[in-house]
Image (cartoon, rainbow, N blue to C red):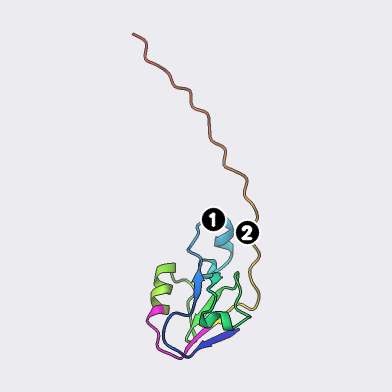
Amino acid sequence: MDAVFEDAGPTGIIFNNSCSCRWCSLAPNRSLQIAEVKPSSPASLRKELVPGLVLLKVQNDSIEGLKFDMALELLSNQQRPLTLTFSREPLPSPPASPAPSIPSLELKTPTT
């Protein structure tokens, strides 16, 4: 799904930062997932832009494999009109991970 932004300035889309968990490694570009659409922003006028959608292309160029910071820099350096291509459906939330177990530590005091 394409979203075209004609006017200069921020789009109003907040993206999630990258993650190194196993779940994210299974989902390409999960680090470029919409986290929030700011109210009263150009993006808020496009009801199809919802949290969970994954950014796939900027100006028809694939961003697959780009790190989060590089993708944000690419976005900020684009002229208008700006065309962003997103996945058609939001990704499901990652499954809950059990809390990591912390091994118990036994402190030993040196004997004199």
x and y percentages locating residue 60 in the rendered image: 50, 86
Question: In this picture, is 38 found above or below 26?
Answer: below
Which residue is rendered at x = 63% and y = 81% of the image?
A: 47
Query: Which amino acid lies under the numbered mark 1 shown in the image of this protein?
Result: Cys
Question: In this picture, is 20 found above or below 9?
Answer: above
Task: Look at the numbered disc 2 and give the secondary structure of its residue.
Answer: loop
Q: How many other residues sit within 10 Å of disc 1, few (<14), some (14-19) or many (≥20)?
A: few
x and y percentages locating residue 51 in the rendered image: 59, 70
Magenta range is: 76-84
Taking the magenta stretch, the answer to whether it contains residue 58 is no
x and y percentages locating residue 59 in the rendered image: 47, 86
x and y percentages locating residue 57 in the rendered image: 51, 81
The span from disc 2 to disc 1 (Cα, nearest Å) is 10 Å
Quadrant holding the C terminus: top left
Of callouts 2 and 1, which one flags the residue occurring earlier in the amino acid sequence? Answer: 1
Task: Look at the numbered disc 1 and give the secondary structure of its residue.
Answer: loop
Which residue is rendered at x = 50% and y = 59% of the image?
A: 19
Taking the magenta stretch, the answer to whether it contains residue 78 is yes
Which residue is rendered at x = 47% and y = 76% of the image?
A: 63
Which residue is rendered at x = 43% and y = 18% of the image?
A: 108
Near-viewer residue (31 or 6): 6
Query: Would residue 81 be found to the left or right of residue 43 on screen?
Result: left
Near-viewer residue (25 or 18): 18
Near-viewer residue (46 or 40): 40
- The numbered dot on residue 94 is 2
Query: Which amino acid lies under the numbered mark 2 shown in the image of this protein?
Result: Pro
Q: How many other residues sit within 10 Å of disc 2, few (<14), some (14-19) or many (≥20)?
A: few
Q: Identify the residue position indicated by label 1 in the image.
A: 21
Q: Are marks 2 and 1 in contact (CB under 8 Å)?
A: yes
Which quarter of the picture shows residue 49? Answer: bottom right
